[in-house]
Image (spheres, grey):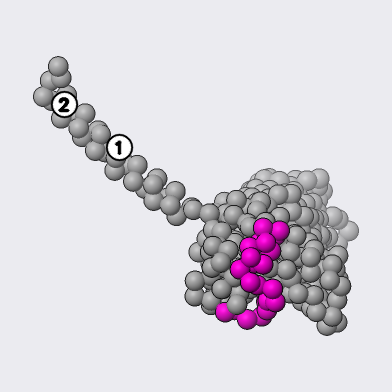
Amino acid sequence: MLAPGEENLIKKLTILMLLLSLPDFSFAEDNKKISIAIMEFRANNTKEGFGKACMDMLSERLFASKLFTLMEKSQMDRIARLNGFQEFSTVDPGQIAKLGRVLKVDKMLVGSITYIDSYIIDIKIVDSITGEIEFNVQKKISSIEKLENAIGDMSQSIERHCMGYYNISGKYDIVFEMQYLNPVGIFRNAVNPGIGLQGVLQFNNPFDVPFDIQAAAGFYNFTPGNKSVNYFYMAPLYLSVSYKFSFTRNINFYPSAGAGYFFSRISCDNSKRTSGLYWDDKSLYYNPSIVIRTELDILLYDRWYLVAAPQYNVFFEEDNVGQFASLGLGLKMLF
């Protein structure tokens, strides 16, 4: 037999466990897979095979996301024929929705690839109940070799829409990061390691080029390396060109190289001179620079990525060359 106090305690724990389990049931319901059927892509002014390639690649990407259940093409055609869909218009949302109800799927995906000086891929999501076009994504590419990357980006846009996330334009991203700074070579005669902040504005494929442009600015605070230096601040400002490599759906890698200027503010009393940089009778320097940067992005949630960015910096002061390595850790937000 349980004592009255123990019995009450068990009841309370049971009620608490039931309450804690409720969000899990809700979460499971919210994550119910969405059933979709993908229609054949219309090929306008280009090869029919390109339309089939779009459909196949989109199917593979959406299936890999584990957010959707996809109706197999042959099964979809068989059900359509059994229900009298011999001639079918992929332009009329009403007909598309009618077929969606016959197929018993939540959404229908309709697409096209059109060539007019460049390739334009267009994908629409049609609600099977209302017949409304609820989402539309379009991508323009200069050559068919870029088709796979374009379909990958469009599939992510579809996933985000269906998950209720913020609609990302994909035109630019912003990175904010903390920097650990480590001087190299003769630069160590002036300063010791320091810390800094840096922001990077990334323009994705501007002017339809296959590269990204990064504009960076920041504030570095080096610890003085000898008694003559009271403080040493540096502000980087540079542009770089990067290229995106996708290791997995959630991990991207961006190597980049660029150039700009480093602006330095120094308090130095010249009481102790050593061979190295920054020993003129002035407190403000501006030096041309070269920057090599690598950036690893790991998806955290929604449009937020964790960023790890090693960087190597070279700047030129009269006859000498200064160098320092840095490691940035921060967050990237997609827009």
The residue shown at (70%, 77%) is 87
Q: Assign the N terminus to one quadrant of the image.
A: top left
User: Magenta span has 2?
Assistant: no
Q: Amino acid at mark 2?
A: Glu
Q: Of helix, strand and loop, which one carries label 1? A: helix
Where 117 sits versus 282, above or below?
A: below
- The reply to whether residue 11 is in sight is yes
Q: Position of residue 84 (x, y in %)?
A: 63, 72
- Dot 2, crowdedness within 10 Å: few (<14), some or many (≥20)? few
Q: Of helix, strand and loop, which one carries label 2? A: helix
Furthest toward the right, the residue is 319
Q: Position of residue 323 (x, y in %)?
A: 79, 51
The residue shown at (61%, 74%) is 96
> Which of 58 and 149 lies nearest the eye of the viewer?
58
Q: Answer left or right for 301 relative to 243.
A: left
> Which of 27 and 312 lies nearest the eye of the viewer?
27
Q: Which mark is residue 7?
A: 2
Q: Earlier in the sequence, mark 2 or mark 1?
A: 2
Q: Position of residue 280 (x, y in %)?
A: 77, 61
The residue shown at (40%, 45%) is 24
> Which of 261 and 83 lies nearest the eye of the viewer?
83
Furthest toward the top, the residue is 1
The segment highlighted magenta reads: 73-94
User: Magenta span has 84?
Assistant: yes
Q: Which residue is mark 1?
A: 17
Q: CA distance from mark 2 to mark 1?
A: 15 Å
